[in-house]
Image (tube, grey):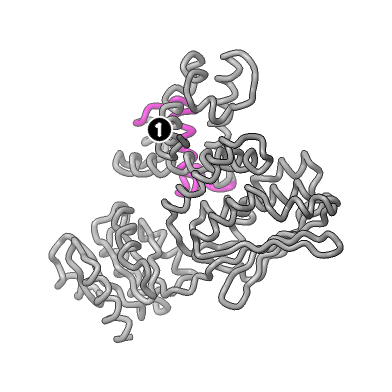
Amino acid sequence: MSLSREAFAEQVKEALLHLYDVAYLPQMELASWLVEGRTGSRDERAQTLRRILIRGIERLDAGAHLPFRARERRSYAILAGRYVRSLTTQDVMDELAISERQYWREHKKAVDALVDLLWEDYCQRATQDAASGNSAEMETTARAEAGLLVAHSQPEEVSVGQVVQQVLDTLRGVCATRGVAVQVVIADPPPLAFVDRTILRQVCMNLLMYAFDLSRDAIVALEVEEQPEAVGIQVRTNVHTAEAQRSERNVGLDVVRQLLEGQGSCLTIAVDAEGCWTALATLPPAQRIPILVIDDNRSLINLFQRYLAGSPYRVVGAESGRRAFELLTTLRPALITLDVMMPNQDGWETLQALKARPDLRAIPVVVCSILDEPELAYSLGADGFMRKPVDQTTLLQAIEQYRQAR
């Protein structure tokens, strides 16, 4: 039976609680999944697993150039403080100047982000082992895990260039070890695609790792470009004739195809007479009409995304007014829905700030609240009001009404 992401996540959470327990860590199933193939004593296995977890936490750090309390560094700061430095929950809250409610909300996000990173590493290794033909069991696992990723995918507007750069940063050590140079060309402005971010990262990693294995000249070319009705990611390298034949059918590439097809995308492979191997992944562009949902409740954002699935609209979520204004530097939504009960800056303040900006005041804002205060909402400049809970029909009617009124 293949490993599920849920079981993997539970093991990561358990390992964080026992990060410095050299007796407990080596006997965890997580050790066999992440430290597989490594020999050594129990202490060495514990140290290796601990190092993997700590490095994963460090990968969440947005950069020391940002203030320690910056929101972008919060996931790293919470996990590093609570587990690496063994601070109490209260100590971390005090250090970051956040409330208990904020702490637990951010803690969940941080743990989920760490699980995503480690799960991606695990799946990548499984796919590589399956591709090399070392294990029929690993091949089955790789296909099953790809199916799970597709089943749980959450497509969103993604900057393909940004994801590619993140993948290249992750693979920098591999490139140095193998002596591979990656020549990158990304269209300006970087194209936006409507895909699941984790699946896109996995596809880019797998294609590059496979190209590294094939490359004859230790040079791999990667290009991200706009195409008619698509965004293209092209990977090229020169290969030997025998390698060109081998590349026509490969389990690892089949898994990439499986992931892409689950996103409405496709993969094509070609090898020319001179031995130039080319892989082209085409992705759906982000062309659906954006609706900005400002609400500190992620489950409501997810609900609205499900409501609008298959419609001409797509939901862009912001869990605070500050995040909304960051998005609005480049995003021009057809409509904004706004919760009023949010920490730090409540929805009323956010509404007033939106309507005070000449470049934003024309965007319709519909207050969406459990409080029955439409009169207050209209007096502060709202264009509409929806009482929670909101059903799918009400949401779609509001979008159509205020789009046509513009």
At 28% across and 55% down in the image, what residue appears?
342
- Spot occupied by residue 4 in the image (x, y as percentages of width and height): 44, 38
In the image, is 225 to the left or to the right of 102?
right
**Toward which corner of the image does residue 307 lie, by quadrant?**
bottom left
Of the 4 image quadrants, the one containing the C terminus is bottom left
- Spot occupied by residue 219 in the image (x, y as percentages of width and height): 81, 53
Image vertical order of residue 47 relative to residue 332, above or below: above
Amino acid type at circle 1 is: Glu
Magenta stretch contains residue 151: no
Of the 4 image quadrants, the one containing the N terminus is top left
Residue position marked by numbered label 1 in the rendering: 10
Numbered circles on residues, count: 1
At 49% across and 59% down in the image, what residue appears?
262
Magenta stretch contains residue 89: yes
At 57% across and 31% down in the image, what residue appears?
52
Q: Which residues are magenta?
A: 65-90
